[in-house]
Image: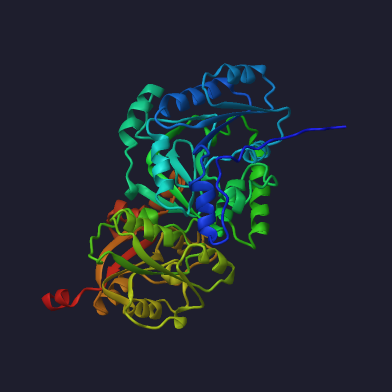
Amino acid sequence: MRNEIIIVNTDGCERPSSHMDYEMVKDVLYEKSKCEEISIIVQAYGRVDKTRLCVDHILRFTQDIPFRLILLDNGSEEKAVMDYFESVEYADKTIIRMTKNITAVYGLDKVMHMVDTKYVVIVNNDVLVTPSWLHNLLKCANSDPKIGMVCPVSTNVGCGQEIDLGGFGTINEMIKKAEHYNISDPAKWEERLRMIPTVVLYRREIFEVVGVYDTGYIHDWGDDDYSFRIRHAGYRLMLCKDTFVHHNHNIRAHEEKDPKDAYNLYKMGRTTFQKRHYGIDSWDDTNDTIASVLRKVDINHHYDGYVESLSIDCKCGAMILDVRNFYRRKEIYDIHTTALVKDIKYYHELQCVADRVIWGDLREIEEKPIYDFITIGKPINQYVNPMEILEKVYRMLTENGLVLFGLINSADYRQFLYCLGITDVRDKEMSRCIYKEEIIDLMLWMGGKIESVMQQEHHVDDEIKATIKAVWQNITQEIGGSNDNKLISNLLVKQYWFVVKKPNMAEIEEN
């Protein structure tokens, strides 16, 4: 017979009243209650030396912010982990011990039910935090009550979250570089579709609204699933590019993992994600990002602090967020986004990202010059009527408006070798044969100004480069000399990116 009494102290909480709406109730429970603001959870499974470094850095670089420290031993076989946790000198400390390791997700889910602070921060035990790390993450989270998840950038991580501060040889050198780097700057915050939480700050209320992690994901893709569920509940994910931590773990070398087992978990998780999210692939459908292209765009047009944007065929909406982040860096925050999507499976996802979603093609949109920035998700030569699309899109631009689109290179090395009978590298879904000069001629004919033409190259090995060069040299022996380097460079272009501006009347009259 078990007779147990559990007392939960709610004396510091305020009871919501009937006149309060949904947001006011949450404000009372999570913003104005007298509970502590932050819990930091460090989960360890073995690796006591890395765990010690992790906790030491938290205590060293979080002295300006009070927090509750929760140390979770997730079934470590080594007694040294518990011995270390017990030795940690911190006034507000709780130790939780799982008797057996099930999975990392299982352990964290058990702890989440015990946490009642406004924010929950999870730090993997192979991460070293740095000066101002929590101050910066909190500043971002406090800037908008709809921000539910915040992550810093780090070493040894994917999903476009990795930087290395130019490299460092020692931990002390890393700390010094991080101290100079970690200067809070809202212009460096980027909204994301999904993130990998090596270090993550959650708004505690999302565990009430969204639920905890799904234990069905043993390892891979569970983070993606939780990112999607947070967005589906109306919250935003923010990557703080003004905050660096060091992930002390070589993910690419499969450190402490069996490569075959890791691949099986990856494959199983990816399939599970697609089943749970109605055919959406978290990799293929979120990586249509134009962030790397926009970083090369140096345009400073005046928009009076407001931007109307349209994104066409943008899958789950990564490029919509890329445009928002682009203007955020220019300190323009009032951006209205419209998504035009033909594939119905993306409709729900886009409703979580865009202000307005239209299902259909360009015929569904009135041909009026109302958009300041238009992006086209698919390469233009993958459409049936590419030139008609470009003409209509151009007419929909306002004065000084921009359109950004891609063009797959119709004269790349694959076509070159295919014409010579080398078919192994042929793209089975070759796009329409349109050359960049044709696009330039069309845009100039309509009155557009080519602001930029950028190149995205194929990633090919030295063997293919040597084959191309040898074949071309054999040809040039028959027809005379040529510029080998320029030719090979052109053949290795995978896709061109065009940024075209619609000039204002003053510029037109000037020309």
- Image coordinates of residue 100 in percent, x first then y, are 73, 29
As drawn, is 19 to the left or to the right of 188?
right
Residue that appears at 32% across and 50% down: 187
At a point 64% along the width and 57% down the height, the residue shown is 274
Along the viewing direction, whichever of 235 and 54 lies nearer the viewer: 235
Asked if residue 98 lies left or right of residue 55, the reply is right
In the displayed image of the protein, which residue is found farthest to the left?
Answer: 510
| Image vertical order of residue 407 relative to residue 29, above or below | below
Q: Residue at x 49, y 29 (%)?
A: 248
Where is the C terminus found, in terms of image quarters? Answer: bottom left
Position of residue 215 relative to residue 71, above or below, is below
Residue 168 vs residue 192, the one in the foreground: 192
**Residue 262 location, quadrant:** top right
In the image, residue 29 lies at what x, y percent? 54, 48
Rendered position, 111 above or below 206: above
Residue 234 in sight in this render:
no
Tell me, yes or no, if residue 327 can be seen here. yes
Rendered location of residue 158, percent (x, y):
49, 43
Is 149 on the left or on the right of 409, as rendered? right
Most foreground residue, 416 or 134:
134
Residue 402 pos. (x, y %): 30, 68
Instruction: Spot the residue most to the right.
Output: 1
